[in-house]
Amino acid sequence: MKNRNEKGFALVLSLVLLLVMSLMGGALIVISSGDHQSNNYSDDYQQTFYVAETAIMEGENYLKNYFLGPWNSKSKKRDLSLRKLPENQGGKSTGGSGFSGTMTLANYDKTFGSYKNTRDVCYNSFHDLDKKNLDNKGVVTAQSWNFGKLLRDSFKTNASKSEKEEAEDLYDYYYEFFIFRIGAVPFKGYGGSVKKTQSDAGQSGMAYRVYGCGLNMDSENMVVSLESTIVFPR
């Protein structure tokens, strides 16, 4: 004799199992999607960090080029007559307009196909910056470069299509730097001396602060800010 209370039990059990498996599948999809987004964010941040390191390196090279003398590509030598330690330019204290974050567009302009207005993004990313001091004294230089265009322009005519496309994929990345001359600081450097009576230790130097940013100007507008201090002997 069949038990009528068991009628439909298999159907109910099947629906319950289907619901449980659907929930598990949905949870796996959400977890996988979250991991994918996290990986994409990590990759974007890493690339932006590398671009920020480029900004610091280029800012330091800018100063070194002045200190050692500009490189003459024709003579393959540095022009030692133009060696100098650059000063802050355009501060309000000297009658200039001051500095509030506006960058000079170095290798692109507003007609650039992938142009993005970075405005004062890099400047505002340094929250502990003495902006009043920079506004009064100005900065040595402030430059904005498109990272992808820099790579694209560096290719020779025989570059492959894939190389060009990879560079163009980086058009959303910019690196920017601005440099502030801090002033005289104690400095001790060593070197050989021909005169026995002459000391090989210098006691004074000039310090500069290099502020650099890597910018990913896509929909998220990611910014990585770095800074360094460099001292030259006087």
Image: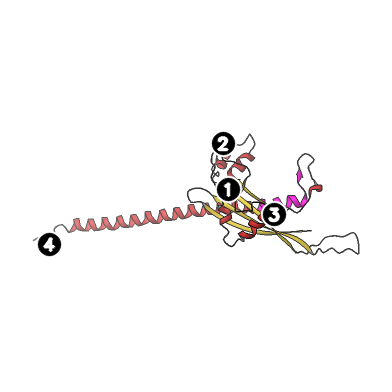
Sequence order check: which comes first, mark 1 or mark 4? 4
Residue at mark 2:
161
Q: Position of residue 89 (x, y in %)?
A: 69, 52
Residue at mark 3:
94
Element carrying mark 1: strand
Q: Residues within 10 Å of mark 3 (few under 14, many from 20)?
A: few
Task: Give the spatial CA distance, label 3 vs label 4.
Answer: 96 Å
Q: Amino acid at mark 4?
A: Asn
Q: Residues within 10 Å of mark 4 (few under 14, many from 20)?
A: few
Which residue is situated farthest in the front direction here?
95
Residue at mark 4:
5
Quadrant showing the C terminus? bottom right
Which of the pair 172/122 is nearer the observer?
Answer: 122
Q: Are marks 1 and 4 in contact (CB under 8 Å)?
A: no
Q: Amino acid at mark 3?
A: Thr
Name the mark nearer the viewer: 3 or 2.
3
Name the mark nearer the viewer: 1 or 3.
3
The residue at 63%/52% (across/down) is 177
Which labelled disc corresponds to residue 174?
1
